[in-house]
Image (cartoon, rainbow, N blue to C red):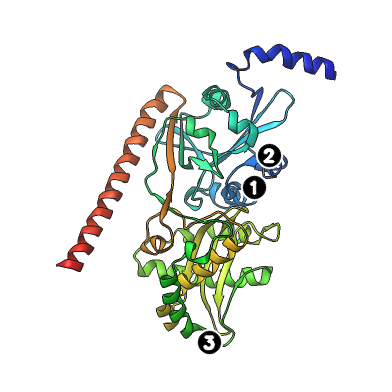
Amino acid sequence: MTMAAAMQSRTAESPARSKASRIAHVDLISDIAEAETVWRALEEPGHLFTPYQRFDLLGSWARSVGEREGARSCVVIARDAERTPLALLPLALRQGHGLRTACFMGGKHTSFNMGLWNAEFAAQAVAADLDVLFAPLHDQVDVLALTQQPRRWHDQQNPFALLPQQSAINGCPLLAMEPGGPPAFRISNSFRRRLKSKEKKLQALTGYRYHLATTDADVTRLLDWFFRVKPVRMAEQKLPNVFAEPGVEQFVRNACLAPRGEGRVIDIHALECDDEVIAIFAGVADGQRFSTMFNTYTMSEHARYSPGLILMRYIIDRYAERGYRSLDLGIGTDEYKRMFCKDDEDIFDSFVPLTSRGKLAAMAMSSLNRGKRLVKQNQMLFDLARRLRQAFG
């Protein structure tokens, strides 16, 4: 098509643009490798996505975990009339109980789920665009179960906030950081003093240090330690060990070793001395937000000195000094998270039926999640009441 013809066709379409979608083509790709080039292009500046949706993270999950769980990859790519990618949805298709469900890739390992969007398109997206985006899925999917979505990311609305929605089951504690703000704005001086006095005991250890793992050897050594200690910690707390599920260790190792700029796709922060690893926190970063994914701490007597909290103080200060605007400690309301995070990320779930069978399923999924959220909230109220009774009884 000549430039003049292209201009003409665009002009001809423009009066209908308010009703029609800018999306002209939607491709469904089942082989994740075929989507790699477009996917990586959508990770470049000028795009809207969370660091959980990087190709190296979800590609590793799809190969190591998703396939073992019987989840088929389905990457939805939307383009405009000039074939420029506008959006990419990293979905996993599952079949069970006579129902075909599509979820975001990443399973239990991603705190936030989202598409990757051309930022300008995302800012103008309307409900009609989402209809066009989902249209090719009607033949293959009964219901879209799109959970743990941030309503906004870096001050821009997530286009899926246009979908019917409900609050997610679990909240996500958030620390907003003011670039260039004083350290006391992030962590109070009294809390810093408490942590400093605990750290004195650790500082006496030979070779005591905080660092971000940068070499493959460091990353591998810290992960070897993590996969030995974490199962013991989880058994102690009577929690199921999600890291023991098939393929999960391989997924984590691949993503932690995958390079990204000066760091990794999953970065590992550690407190160590010459004799042992004392604590680690691993998470994803994107220049504005650091999100933790997993952590654990030593089984030795040094655990008494709150090494996880000391390490988190180092991490918060490190990212604040680099101009980051926020930090979150992942989904869930563990008490240590509230020591640092006073706000909550606004996250929601959407259950979108694409077939008549999907309508019933969407209603059931929606009710189930509402019920779980209610139980969680009541459990929190119950725990709070119990603690108050202990304090004042």
Q: Nearer the viewer, mark 3 or mark 1?
A: 3
The kind of residue on which mark 2 rests is Ala
- The part of the image, by quadrant, that contains residue 10 is top right
Toward which corner of the image does residue 128 lie, by quadrant?
Answer: top right
Q: Earlier in the sequence, mark 3 or mark 1?
A: 1
Q: Can you tell which quarter of the image residue 39 is in?
A: top right
Q: Which residue is mark 3?
A: 205
Which type of secondary structure does the marked residue at label 2 adopt?
helix
Label 2 vs 1, first from the N-terminus: 2
Q: Position of residue 317 (x, y in %)?
A: 55, 66
Instruction: Provide the residue designation for mark 2.
Output: 35
Residue pictured at 44% horizontal, 78% vertical = 299
Q: Nearer the viewer, mark 2 or mark 3?
A: 3
Picture coordinates of residue 241, whole percent (x, y): 43, 61
* Sooner in the amino-acid sequence: mark 2 or mark 3: 2
Q: Amino acid at mark 3?
A: Leu
> Does 266 sit left or right of 7 as displayed?
left
- Determine whether the residue tagged by mark 3 lies in a helix, strand or loop: loop
Q: Is residue 361 above or below residue 46?
A: above
Q: Which mark is residue 55?
A: 1
Q: Look at the numbered discs 2 and 1 and tell me whether their residues touch, using CB distance below 8 Å.
A: yes
Q: Secondary structure at mark 1?
A: helix
**Quadrant that contains the C terminus:** bottom left
Point out residue 351 in the picture as x, y percentages from the top left corner.
42, 33
